[in-house]
Image (spheres, rainbow, N blue to C red):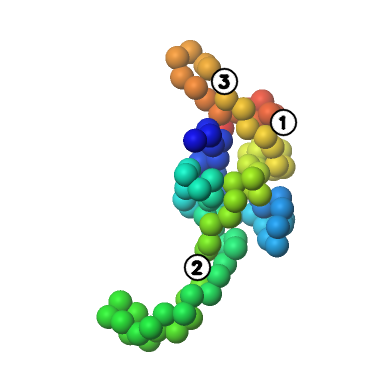
């Protein structure tokens, strides 16, 4: 399993695929499949039957996972996409932006 540098709560931009240019917050990361669910990106329609939970049924829009390689973290300082590095400060590992050298 590889070390992922994107975590839940990060603001990311899609850099490849049908939703290129879209931005959103990472809701969930699946480390085994190398996929992430990004808020408002890669929306799919799911047909649901009426049930106790949703008595109306119908078509529900929800986010589908997107490949980690197709998203890039947005630097909070410059508001541009950036690569992420990991360095040791004291006795802790911290993530930092390679463009602004700022701790994330």
Question: Could you tell me how many numbered marks the image carries?
Answer: 3
On the question of residue 12 being in view, the answer is: no
102 lies left or right of 1: right
- Rendering coords of residue 85 (x, y %): 62, 27
Q: Note whether 98 is above or below 6 in the view shown.
A: above
Residue most toward the top? 90
How far apart are labels 3 and 1 at the CA level? Answer: 15 Å
- Residue 99 disc label: 1
Nearest the viewer among 19 and 30 is 30
Q: Is residue 62 above or below residue 16?
A: below
Q: Quadrant of the C terminus?
A: top right
Residue 56 in view in this figure:
yes
Q: Residues within 10 Å of mark 2 (few under 14, many from 20)?
A: some
> What is the x, y in percent for residue 32?
47, 44
Q: Which mark is residue 87?
A: 3
Q: Nearer the viewer, mark 3 or mark 1?
A: 3
Q: Quadrant of residue 66?
A: bottom right
The secondary element bearing badge 2 is classed as: strand
Q: Earlier in the sequence, mark 2 or mark 3?
A: 2
**Labels 2 and 1: the sequence-earlier one:** 2
- Residue bearing mark 2: 62
Dot 3, crowdedness within 10 Å: few (<14), some or many (≥20)? few
Report the disc number at residue 66: none
Q: CA distance from mark 2 to mark 1?
A: 33 Å
Marks 2 and 3, how far apart at CA = 36 Å
Q: Residue at x 59, y 46 (%)?
A: 68
Helix, strand or loop under label 1:
loop
Estimate the x, y position of residue 73 in percent, counting from the top left.
63, 42
Q: Is residue 25 left or right of residue 83?
A: left
- First in sequence: mark 3 or mark 1? 3
Disc 1 crowd rating (10 Å Cα; few below 14, some 14-19, many 20+) is some
């Amino acid at each position: 399993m590889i070390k992922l540098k994107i975590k839940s709560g990060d603001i990311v931009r899609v850099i490849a695929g049908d939703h290129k240019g879209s931005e959103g917050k990472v809701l969930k990361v699946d480390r085994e499949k190398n996929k992430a669910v990004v808020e408002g990106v890669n929306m799919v329609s799911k047909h649901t039957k009426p049930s106790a939970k949703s008595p109306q049924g119908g078509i529900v829009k929800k986010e589908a996972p997107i490949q980690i390689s197709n998203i890039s973290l947005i630097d909070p300082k410059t508001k541009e996409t950036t690569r992420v590095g990991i360095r040791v400060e004291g006795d802790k590992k911290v993530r930092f932006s390679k463009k602004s050298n700022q701790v994330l």
